[in-house]
Amino acid sequence: MNIVENFDLYAPRLINKKELLSSGHRACSGCAEVLAVRLMAKALGENTVIASATGCMEIVSSMFPTTAWNVPWIHVAFENAASVASGIEAGLKALRKKGKIDDRYVKVVGMGGDGATMDIGFQALSGAMERGHDMIYVCFDNEAYMNTGIQRSSGTPMGASTTTAPAGKVSSGQKTWKKNMPEIMVAHDIPYVATACPSYPLDFIRKMEKAKSIKGPSYIHCFSVCPTGWRCPSNQAISMGRLAVETGVFPLYEVENGHYRLSPDMPKKLKPIKDYFKGQGRFRHLSAEEIDTIQGKVTTEFKKLTEKAKFLK
Amino acid sequence: MAKRIGMEVAVAVAEAVGLCDIDMAAVYPITPQSHIAEHLSDLVADGKIDAEFVTVESEHSAMSAVIGASGAGARSYTATSSQGLMYMHELLPIASAMRLPITMAIANRAVSGPLNILNDHSDIMPQRDSGWISIFVENAQEAIDMSIIAFKIAENKDVMLPVNINIDGFQLTHMVEPFEMPTQEEVRNFLPPFVPHATLHPAKPVTMGAFAMSDYFPEIMKAKDEALKNSKKIILEVWDEWAKMFGRAYKPVETYKAEDAEVLMLTMGSMGETAQMAIDELRAKGVKAGLVKLRLWRPFPFAEIKAAVKNAKKLIVTDRAVSFGGPGGPVFSEVKSALYAEAQRPVIYDYIYGLGGRDVPVGDFVGMFERVLADTANKEVDTYEFWGVRE
């Protein structure tokens, strides 16, 4: 029985009914990222403090004097969500220890987009993870600087056309491979790293809950389809996320204390990446040859991952 | 009763902060601030301070972390210098806009380039408009007193603004000076626990750092400006309270032999004590010289400055930073504009001196006075002058 097809049956038992990110925010229609943020908040529950980087999710949820947040939330700047979260964690820890606040356990979460995480906030994130703060960092990766208008980041995949790495007469869009951020986090030797996608809500929620249960730093890399930036219909955000997983472009896995595990949602046999590319305007210019090259890389990377899962169980 | 002791100033500042029941400190090492950071970490390691000590990977993260901790309701402290302060720059107006009572020591040091580790004020001057309360200290005693006082000012419910304490790098931070260190009990009596009005805690969820466009942004800026201006009243009250408890009185502007002075000099920071010796030397020669020391840089003490200089014929403003291509040093611009509308005011001269740690002995201050006294034209000079700089 497919759990997603029977969602109505399972959902009330599996998902927190409380909305901690309320409706009425200003996200684009079909935004998979804001859905992911909503699921994240549900998974974390009320005893959570969130530090957000500048970006889409900050802009759409906190237009003064309104807020969409029903949990404590702070935004300071673009590159420092992880540092701010680490400071909140340290502050709350001291206050709790000294009896200045009630002794409930509060999880501190830093969040940012791919630019805020993989580019400008990379150092702050590395520092916070290395220092071992009891916090979660979630990267909502929509593969470009969407808030400023679809400029390329180090999370943009090879070949994607963006406003600063456009496809042109002599260029095929992004010229570099996507930075493997989850692996960089694994290299920090933190207790828990996972990839997730809101197209697989139960998998995502389970991973968030696991991260919440872990004392110490954890990192979730959440693949977040952006119909606006990827030039795909807004009603296809969920299916596009599933295709990214099914083609191995964005494999779902987790690494717990160095042990790799592919998520049960991963198919035994991958679909060809052209199935995933064809629905997106950002890949429209790619030649069959170029798609083959990218296919080769995706296959190799996925093989590397399955080998790790085999030998680092 | 506090004993009179001797100690390196940076270490003493950390000791003083250690008396303030801080909950959290985040620091990144930079010369000449490092001794503050190191000694604070010693105090935490020895269990003398019950605080989280976060050794961040940059000054940007130091300020980010104290913003987070302060937002969570923790009494939070940091210290930096020069490039570190420049790296924090982006976050300073955010800390003040969020009305977070962070306190920060700045071991003032020249800003690159070229790289230089010695003292001037070029690091703090670019932070002037960030909405922080900004205080300059002259000696060890002041550095210690202000380090404690800063928390009480910042956390006052009618202030709720961050405070920076400017301590001249090396020239003050690395000196061994005698001072009285207040006792733990005295500080406890002076400084009440921090009671934040809103915190990042699930008990009462709040949103901090919201996004505001043109429909609210100007009002928020005006509110911040008014908050900073209004903080002066509280600063004066807290200084009075300190004077009553500890017998050491502080004012936004201090004067030395200024009452009947015909020529005044204005200094900020540790140079004041050297300039004071020059005044004594000149007075001995019969020159009616006097000194004005500017302690409170923000909010700027307009009334006190006007009152302090109004009877003088000439005023020498000294600057330890350059506003390149501008009207003069930053202190000069400020003082001159403060006096612009005054019917009775001195002719104002500007000397930029002591850059990148260049030594300024007593004789140099005497020289500035002599140069100004020799100017018989008595006309407002349009330009500033670099003192003691090779052509």
Image (cartoon, coloured by chain):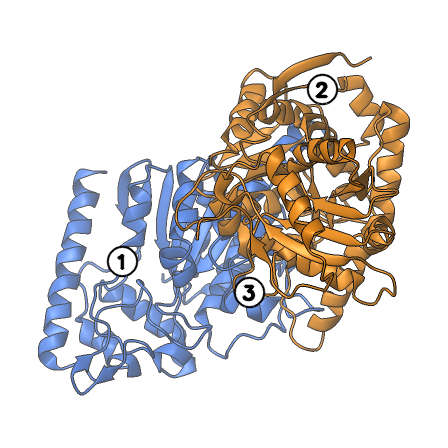
Q: Look at label 3 and name its amino acid.
A: Glu
Q: Look at label 1 and name its amino acid.
A: Lys
> What is the secondary structure assignment of the residue under circle 3?
helix
**Is residue A108 among the parts visible in the rendering?**
no
Say whether residue A164 is left or right of residue A73.
left
Q: Colour of chain A?
A: blue
Numbered badge on residue B179: 2
Q: Look at label 2 and name its amino acid.
A: Phe
Numbered badge on residue B65: none
Distance between mark 1 and mark 3 Cα atoms: 24 Å
Looking at the picture, do discs 2 and 1 lie on one chain?
Answer: no
Residue annotated with mark 3: A58
Numbered badge on residue A179: 1
In percent of width and height, residue B111 lies at 48, 48
For the residues carrying marks 2 and 3, which lies nearer the camera in this image?
Answer: 2
Looking at the colours in the rendered structure, which chain would you say is drawn in orange?
Answer: B
Neighbourhood count class around disc 1 (C-alpha, 10 Å): few under 14, some 14–19, many 20 upward: some
Chain label for disc 1: A
In percent of width and height, residue B344 lies at 87, 61
Distance between mark 2 and mark 3 Cα atoms: 49 Å
